[in-house]
Image (cartoon, helix red, strand yellow):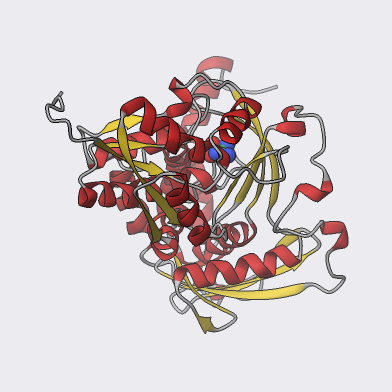
Amino acid sequence: MIECVSEQAMKILLAYSGGLDTSVAIIWLQKQYNAEIIGFCSDIGQEEDLEGARAKALRTGAKACHVLDQRDEFVRDFVFPAIRGAAVYEGEYFLGTALARPCIARGMMEIAAREGCGAIAHGATGKGNDQVRFELAAYWFNPSIKIIAPWREWEFKSRSELMAFATQQKIPVEASAAKPYSIDRNILHTSYEGGVLEDPDKEPPAEMFQRTIDPRKAPNQPRDVEIRFEKGNPVAVDGQAMGPSALLAELNKIAGEHGVGRADVVEDRFVGMKSRGVYETPGGTVLHKAHRAVASLTMDREAMRLRDSLATEYAALIYRGFWFSPEREALQKLIDAVNEPVTGVARLRLFKGNLMVIGRNAARSLYRADIVTFEDDRGSYDQRDAGGFIRLNALRLRTTAVAYRGSTTK
Ligand code: ARG
């Protein structure tokens, strides 16, 4: 540890959202650490007023506040790799928050280095995954960074205590004092936890959802969409080439209008507890399905089996915050290698919350109609080969049957 000898104030870079918790954190950190606070807001497509947040940070006492547009880097460097790897946690969760945290941490650590901040702080609580994700990534970029998590230290135990402190400190508190959920939003998803959702048997209130229409109220006409992939990355929608975040935004709009992408799950947090979460991942849900449709034509069978067998592990390590780790980078190399041939088009139909593949094509497809046909294959496949193929596969089964049950079966 390097001790601060001078009277010079310690500089802390705080991940700032403009919300109550991180606003209180500005004042609390100043007092507690006699520190100079610099704010950091990442734009990852949450569609919140970040210039407003910046102004609020300055009004609340921050010396400066950086706003960094990370939308394209988030989608290109985090969301698309996860889609190439079929990363789905516990069968349901597309990792919208888990992918955002290392991206934000990377942007933040760049600014911490530039600003000469020896410490960073964040508003994640001591109960969740986000603290782990933030901090593991921060240590990766600067092994000697000091990390402060006010929620693990301060005396406030509830939102109402935070509110009381904020009012006392003249921090502007939004009128909506009762915040019904813990919401995390970015271009990939919106997640909801807490409040009435804490009973896993209670259906989420209809008015909670922000970016997908109730499937029961979705249009009576389906919407077909065509997505082109190159080397496993989506590059065009309905024939129109688009950059990463524009493409995802477009699919969010289309899928949201048809009620596609909702998931209501109970998941296992890294710290050991189960938690109920509801997610809206409209465009991401479409992309995962479309990617698999193109891979079904273009990816070698054993390459896919290997990728899929590792997908659970890959998803778990992303969920647990190990995006920046030797094991994720090694896995990514394999995932990207098997995605090299994944170039082609998938067509999907969106209809009242459903998502159906209705077609796929690829210039270098491995699908051979001449071989698979029920019609005359003109000698491209010799059915007599199958007898020996099955007999050799059965050799060990027959050997076992004889060893355990004698030569005949009744
Ligand atoms: N349970 C999800 C996860 O761990 C979502 C977390 C949302 N975070 C938040 N601060 N509300 O990835």
* Quadrant field for ligand 1: top right
| Left or right: 30, with 249 as reference point | left
| Left or right: 374, with 392 as reference point | right
Q: Residue at x 46, y 50 (%)?
A: 59
Of residue 373 and residue 172, the one placed in the foreground of this image is 172
Can see residue 124?
A: yes
Q: Residue at x 39, y 50 (%)?
A: 40
| Left or right: 114, with 374 as reference point | left
Assign the C terminus to one quadrant of the image: top right
Indicate the position of residue 349 as horizontal and vertical percent values: 72, 69
Of residue 124 and residue 211, the one placed in the foreground of this image is 124
Q: Residue at x 31, y 42 (%)?
A: 324
Indicate the position of residue 77 as horizontal and vertical percent values: 37, 58
Picture quadrant of residue 198? top right
Indicate the position of residue 200 as horizontal and vertical percent values: 75, 29
| Left or right: 8, with 242 as reference point | left
Can see residue 321?
A: no
Q: Is residue 157 above or below residue 78?
A: above
Of residue 208 and residue 48, the one placed in the foreground of this image is 48
Q: Residue at x 74, y 51 (%)?
A: 209
Indicate the position of residue 296 as horizontal and vertical percent values: 53, 62
Picture quadrant of residue 73? bottom left
Assign the N terminus to one quadrant of the image: top left
- Count of all numbered marks drawn on residues in the image: 0
